[in-house]
Image (cartoon, helix red, strand yellow):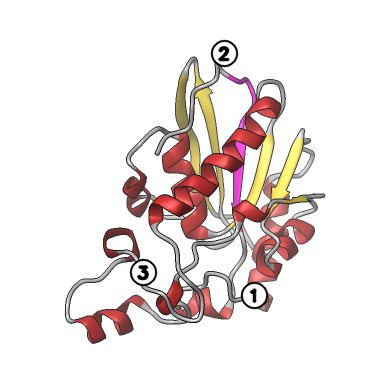
Amino acid sequence: MTAHPPSEAPVGRLVLLRHGETAWSRSGQHTGRTDIPLTEHGEDLARAAGNLLAGHTFGLVLASPLQRAWRTAELAGLTAEREDNLVEWDYGAAEGRTTAEIRADVGYAWSAFTHGVTPGKTPGESIEEVAARMALVLARVTPVLRERDVALVGHGHALRILTSVFLRQEVRFAAQLLLDAGSVSVLRYDKEFPAVHTWNRLPSLV
């Protein structure tokens, strides 16, 4: 799935802020719709990410409604609007489990990107369904990007998939885009070509 290119390349930049650390992101557990808070370190990361964005103005800031993203936006000094499509991948039966645990059970090198997920307490989503949601987010922000910068505050896998859609790449390209908790990334257009300007910049806690 790809985003439709605009008729004229926007001049604004798309800033991506992944939420700060949670207990599950630290342990490597898949955290989709489980609404858990930031750790103390995660709150520090969010404040420090705000320092990277200090003095910058945005035409629009959107955040996932899950508390780890919403709180990150607040601590970073961003006044955000809720965007339900920015929620993380629904991992179904993989929710709360690490990749190592799942691989031990299934007996092969499982990956959500490659093999998908199965229903659990929630139905789960295919990667194509996540990409469709991210395309809707991009459709919402593109009119603003024509003139102004936009910030999105969300989750690791969802933002990686959004980036693949923005870059007009096959959606599983997202597996090759590492995105750390509390990191800031910047996407933009170079003429008519969507491009990565800055990727996975971690704020300094000093």
Q: Residue at x 36, y 69 (%)?
A: 117
Q: Earlier in the sequence, mark 3 or mark 1?
A: 1
Q: Is residue 99 above or below residue 145?
A: below
Q: Nearer the viewer, residue 190 or 157?
A: 157
**For numbered disc 2, what is the local secondary structure?**
loop
**For numbered disc 1, what is the local secondary structure?**
loop
Residue 70 position within the rendered picture, expressed as x and y whole percent measured from the top left: 73, 61
Q: Nearer the viewer, residue 124 or 54?
A: 124
Q: CA distance from mark 1 to mark 2?
A: 39 Å
Label 1 sits on what residue type? Asp
Give the numbered dot on residue 191.
none
Q: Is residue 22 above or below residue 15?
A: below
Say left or right for 5 vs 13: left
Residue 203 position within the rendered picture, expressed as x and y whole percent measured from the top left: 60, 55
Give the numbered dot on residue 117.
3
Q: Are marks 1 and 2 in contact (CB under 8 Å)?
A: no
Camera-side mark, 3 or 1: 3
Rendered-image quadrant of the N terminus: top left
Label 3 sits on what residue type? Val
Residue 18 position within the rendered picture, expressed as x and y whole percent measured from the top left: 58, 56
Q: Which residues are magenta?
A: 10-18
Q: Residue at x 41, y 79 (%)?
A: 93
Q: Earlier in the sequence, mark 1 or mark 2?
A: 2
Image quarter of residue 99: bottom left
Say left or right for 84 vs 5: right
Label 2 sits on what residue type? Glu
Residue assigned mark 2: 8
Is 12 one of the magenta-colored residues? yes
**For numbered disc 3, what is the local secondary structure?**
loop
Residue 3 position within the rendered picture, expressed as x and y whole percent measured from the top left: 48, 32
Residue assigned mark 1: 35
